Image (tube, grey):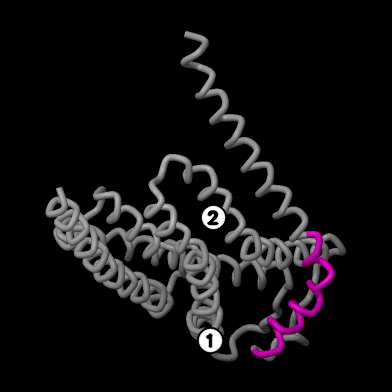
Amino acid sequence: MADRQLPLIEHFNELRKRIVAVFVVFVASCALMLFFAKRCYLWLVHDLGVVNKLAVLGPTEIVGVYFMIAGIAAIAITLPFAAWQLWLFVAPALTERERRTTLTYIPAVFLLFLSGLIFGYEVVFPNILHVLLGMNDGLFQVVFTTERYFRFMVNVVLPFGIVFELPVVVVFLTNLGILTPQWMRKVRRIAYFVLIVIGVILSPPDFVSDLLMSVPLLLLYEICVGVSSFADRRRRRKIRKFADNQ
C-alpha cells in the first residue's frame, strides 16, 4: 500500500514545487514592474487624454494603482513560465511527438494572452468609455478617480486576455480526442447564449457596450470551431497513418 502511495506523493510534491516556482516568478516580476509602474501609468492615460482628470481619494489609492498595473504586467510575464512549468510536469507522461507538439503551445499561450490584452485595450475599452461618457451629454461634471478608472480598465481588458486563450485550449482538447468540431457546431446556439450572457455581465449596463463585448466573443468561438476542425483533421490523418503502418 505504501509503495502505491509513494508515486502519488511524489507527484503532489512535484506539483507543489512547480506552483511555488510560478509564485516566486510572479512576485519577482511584480516587484520589478513596480519600478516601471509610473511609466506604464502615464502611457495608459496619455492616449485617452484624461491625465489631468484623474484624482485620488487617499494615499493608499496611489499604491493600489501601482500594484494593479504591476500585477497585470507580472501576469503577462509569468504566463509563459507557468505554461512551461505545466509542460515540465506533464511531459514525462507524453510521447516524444506529443512533447514537441505541446511545447509549441507555450509561445502561443503568451502571444494570445498579449493579443487579447491589446484588443481589449485598443478596441473595446476606448469604445465603451466613449459610449459611457457620451451618455453624460453635459449633465454631470465628470471626475475620474485613478483607482476606479484603472479598475474599470482591468475589468474590461483582462477578460479578453483570458478568453483569447480558448483556441489553445480547444486545440489541446481536440488533439486528445475530448473535443470535436462536430460537437462545437451542435452546441453553437447554447455557446452563443452563454457567451452573450458573459459579455453582458462583463460590460457596463448599456446596449452598445454589451454589443462591443459580446460580438468579439462570438467571433472567437467561430475561430475556435475552425482551429478545432483543423486539429481534428490532423489527428485523424495521424491515426490513419499509424493504422496503415501496423
Which class describes the residues within 10 Å of circle 1: few (<14), some (14-19), or many (20+)? few
Q: Along the horizontal axis of the image, is 80 left or right of 243?
A: right
Question: Measured from the top left, where is residue 189 in percent x and y?
Answer: 19, 62
Q: Nearer the viewer, residue 11 or 238?
A: 238
Q: Which residues are magenta?
A: 31-47
Q: Nearer the viewer, residue 47 or 88?
A: 88
Spatial CA distance of label 2 from label 1 is 36 Å
Name above or below for residue 178 compared with residue 78. above
Residue positioned 30% across, 58% down in the render: 194
> Residue 104 shows which numbered tag?
none
What residue would you read off at disc 2? Answer: 83
Residue positioned 43% across, 53% down in the render: 99
Q: Is residue 184 visible to us here?
A: no
Q: Along the horizontal axis of the image, is 38 left or right of 105?
A: right
Which class describes the residues within 10 Å of circle 2: few (<14), some (14-19), or many (20+)? some
Q: Secondary structure at mark 1?
A: helix
Q: Nearer the viewer, residue 182 or 59?
A: 182
Three-letter amino acid code at disc 2? Ala
Indicate which disc, 2 or 1, sits on the residue closer to the N terminus. Answer: 2
Question: Measured from the top left, where is residue 227 in percent x and y?
Answer: 29, 68
- The answer to which quarter of the image holds residue 224 is bottom left
Question: Measured from the top left, where is residue 201 in percent x and y?
Answer: 43, 61
Name above or below for residue 5 compared with residue 100. above
Q: Is residue 19 visible to us here?
A: yes
Q: Is residue 34 magenta?
A: yes
- Outermost residue on the front side: it is 245
Residue positioned 59% across, 91% down in the render: 138
Residue positioned 33% across, 60% down in the render: 171
Name above or below for residue 141 compared with residue 105. below
Question: What secondary structure is the stretch in magenta mostly built from?
Answer: helix
What residue would you read off at disc 1? Answer: 130
Q: Nearer the viewer, residue 10 or 212?
A: 10
